[in-house]
Structure formats: structure tokens, C-alpha cells
Image (cartoon, rainbow, N blue to C red):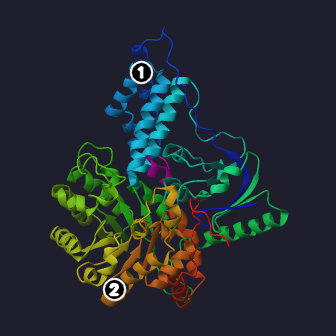
Amino acid sequence: MVITGVGIGRGIAMGPVLRMPDPIREPSSRPRSDDTDAATEVSRVDAALARVREDLERRADAAAHGDGGARQAASILTALAQMTDDPALHDSIVAGIGRGLTAQRAVFEGFGGFEAKLSALGGYMSERSADLHDIGQRVMADLLHVQAPGIPHSERPFVLVATDLSPADTAALDPGSVLAIVTSQGGPTSHTAILARARSIVAVVSAARAADLVNGDNVIVNAASGTVSVNPSDEEVSVAREAKARADRAKGLRGLPGGLADGTAIPLLANVARPQDAGPALEYGAEGVGLFRTEFLFIANGEPPGVEEQTREYTKLLERFPGRKVVIRVLDAGADKPLPFLTPENEPNPALGLRGLRSLKAHRQVLDDQLEALSRADRQTRADLWVMAPMVADQYEAAYFVTLAKSKGLRKVGVMAEVPSIAFMADEVAAVADFVSIGTNDLTQYTMAADRTLGSVSGYQNAWHPAVLRAIKLIADAGVRHGMPVGVCGEAAADPDLAVVLVGLGVNSLSMSPAALDDVRAELAGCTLEQARSRATRALRGDFYHPSADPHVEPLRG
């Protein structure tokens, strides 16, 4: 049997299946016994919430000091911990206890009610529903004195199979024990996918039939083909071992500049989230930084950091890359990264609301302080600093940001292309911006009107779609006409086959998770620019795009 899904990276892993434990069963709805008073039950809930919060905070702290992949989870875990303090949620649970429910049942109904409300909102808020569910499971487990569902333990390495992984579970993955991940839900830009790639763990997500796998099944997980082969033959095992050996040979090119077989240079850069991530980026041979996310300075704070604090952190990063390109993105708040001092409460659809540059324009002091800090750090270091704004829609917003940033003394100022409108205005944007960096994750979700966090539409979150590639080509063509560099810093750059197509479309540089650099470098080195352009032509026609089957639509017959 072969199960298909969406592969993350190009790795191959073989081993026995070990499934995530089943979730905690729904507690009984029968009223509690007369000898248990409401005050005692409320105290039990408060204590459980506190213990879960402390556990998540410990996990966040450990993640913040872990490897690059783990550090990406630190802010997510901090946000989860904060959810345990939600007063409305607490009031709902207390009200349930007041109606005679047990503490477990009141927690189940309280969390369930809020989950349903968030799910009904759709978009990014739906993802918060899944996070709430995970917290509710942990609180119920504490009340029942049982272990919360989580990564199973095994004396030998295994292939982890689950419906999906919560952020807390993903952060706890041990690459020494987990050979690969297979999930029946999730998409290529889910937390599971992004963190698996960052930690070099082979993964296939959105594989609906993974639910059929049982403990002990031997499987080959092939991320390159997006397949899971169950109880493979000796021949299949042999072929998989050869493919794995080829992938291992790609590591031999580490440290060489990115480029094509005909000598065309394609700089390969790294996406990093904190200054500490410079180490892994350099270890994997990154030629610089194509995306430095500054959100870590702002998330989980009650107010924005000062200019001095920001300057110190930016300086730490820039000092690691003397003479090399470092692209720093100003704060991208909103949507799945709400900040109490910056983003509106209760936006009905935050993915289409005040996020990115829109939010910064509404809070000018935050933007001014960040640009001032970047300018100071630039003057203190020898890196080649490029600064860009997120979620720019057109040349008017581009001109606003470029003018403001250059007034602070910054020399190379550009914008991110994530909103489809920027592709149609690419020539006008190129006339005012020094560069454009394409964020394919958001560009894809907005082009396809498919939330990148929803497993139900994960098949649409596919940068191979001709519509997405044509938008990229519009931007790349404008870059050629105006002599403007165009890079890609979304997850699409980490797909070796798609990386070749992007270069064929006219993209000048690629930035990705450090762990993806080996495979992309090897793939580019095996083809010429002419071959890349030929593949791009075919990709624009849709030759390589395969729509995912929609499980909600019955196939036509006859």
C-alpha cells in the first residue's frame, strides 16, 4: 500500500510506525456528587491551569535555548501559555461548575465552546482553535492525573504518525528518536511542516490515509515524492536506500556558493528568527540572510522594545555576517501574530485586516523606532544590510516605506511581495524600491484564497499552481526591466525542484531554512540556466501541477 500526501523537503526515512496516543475521552456529563462543592472544583481547575501554564512556559524557555528549529516554536509556546489566563474562558468554566458539572466536564465544555467560536471565524483564528484544544487536553489530563497526549516514548527510533501535531508537541520532537513524521491533516506551511523542515526531520503531511497505519507497520517515508510505502518489498527498500545515499552526497557541496551548472550564480541565503540562528545558517553554508524575522523582540511583550534593546539584537546578527547580505524584515504583526499594543482586538478576519505595513503605518512610533535601531546597528557593523517591509500592496505603500527608511540613513530598502496586487503593479514598484523579496507562503494563500493554516484547503496551498508562478514571473520580469533584484524567501525556495523553476522565472536569490540548503544547492548545480528556463515554461503551463483530490466532492461517474 502506498499513501500519498504533501512531502516536506526531499529526505527519505525508513522505520516502524508509532502512533500518537489517542486524545483524552470526553468526560461524563453527569452532575458531580453532592459531597464535592463548587469552590473545591474551581480551586482544582485554577491549580491545573497554573500547572499547564508553567509547563508551557518551561517548554518555551527550553525551546528558546535549543536549536534553530526549536527556537521557532518558543513564541508559539509562549502564546499558548498566555491562553490559560483568558478571563472569559475562566468565567465559562466557573459557570459550568456552578451548574453542577465536574471540573473535568466544565473544562471540556468551556474550552469546547471557545474552540467552536474560533473555528466559525475561519482563517488564522481557526488555527487558534486547535491550540485551545491542545491546552484543554492538557488541563483535563492534569485534573484526571493522567499523562497528557504527547510524543510517545520508544527505545528505538520510529516514524511518528498522528492526525496532526500541536505546537507544543512539535517543539518537543527529538530528531534522534523521530525518523519521520506522517500526519493526516496539516499543510505544507503548517507549524508541523515548517518546524520539521527547520530540524531536518523527514515529513509527509496531509496524508488522509495515514489514519490506516498501525503501530509496528514498517514504512518508507519519501518526502520528495510525498509518499508513504507500507511494509515495502526488499526491492523498494533497496531503491530507498540508494535515494537516501544520493541525498547524503548533497552534503558534499556544503560551503560552496549557490549556482547553476553553467556558472550562473544564485546566492543561497538563510531564513532566521533570532541572532542565535546565525550559527546553523553558517554551518549549512548560507551565503547570508535572506529573511530575518524581528517578531521575537515584540511577541509576548506588553509594549514594544526600546531603540537600545533593538539595536543590540540587530547588531548581534549583523556582526556574524561581515561583508555579507543580511535582509531584515520590519515587524510583521497581525493575523496569526497578534500584539496587544499594535493589532486590533476581535478583527473578524485578521488575515485580511491590519497586518504588516498596514499596522505599522497606524502605529508610526513603533516603525520609527525600529528603523532608527536598524540604522544604528548598520553603522556599527560591516554587514551589507537590506531592510524590507511586509505585506506591501502597491507602489504607493512601497514609496512610503522606502522614503521613510532612507530618511533614517538606511541604504538598501525594499518590500515583500505577498499581496497579489503587487504583481500587477510590479513595474511601478520597481521604480521606487531597491529590491523585492517574494514571500510565497502568503502570496499563495492570497492568490488561491485558501488559508495556509487550514488542513481542509491544504491542497490549494501549493506554490506550483500556475497562477502563483505567473504572479512571480510578473515580478521577476519587472526586476529584469528595471535592474531590480528579486528574491524568494518563502517555503517554496526550500523545494529543490521548485527552486530550479523559480530561477528559470528570473529570481536572483533564494532564502530558506538552513537545513534545506544542501538539497537546493545540489539540485541547482545539476542544471543550466537554459534548462531552468525550459522547466519554468512548462511549470507556467501547469505541467508539474497536480491538484489534490477534494475529499468533500464526490467524483463524477459515467
Q: Whole-percent x and y of residue 175? A: 61, 51
Quarter of the image where one finds residue 92 = top left
Q: Whole-percent x and y of residue 125? A: 38, 50
Q: Amino acid at mark 2?
A: Ala
Quarter of the image where one finds residue 486 = bottom left
Q: Which quadrant would the C terminus be assigned to in this image?
A: bottom right
Residue at 48%, 64% (x, y): give it. 282
Residue at 21%, 69% (x, y): give it. 401
In the depicted view, which residue is nearer to us: 411 or 424? Answer: 424
> Is any atom of residue 55 visible in this view?
yes
Mark in the foreground, 2 or 1: 1
Q: What kind of secondary structure does the magenta stretch mostly adopt? A: helix
Which residue matches tag 1? Answer: 97
* Residue found at the very far front of the displayed protein: 558
Q: Amino acid at mark 1?
A: Ile
Q: Which quadrant would the N terminus be assigned to in this image?
A: bottom right
> Is any atom of residue 373 visible in this view?
no
Which residue matches tag 2? Answer: 478
* Residue found at the very far right of the displayed protein: 234
Answer above or below: position of 506 versus 366. below
What's the magenta region?
66-76
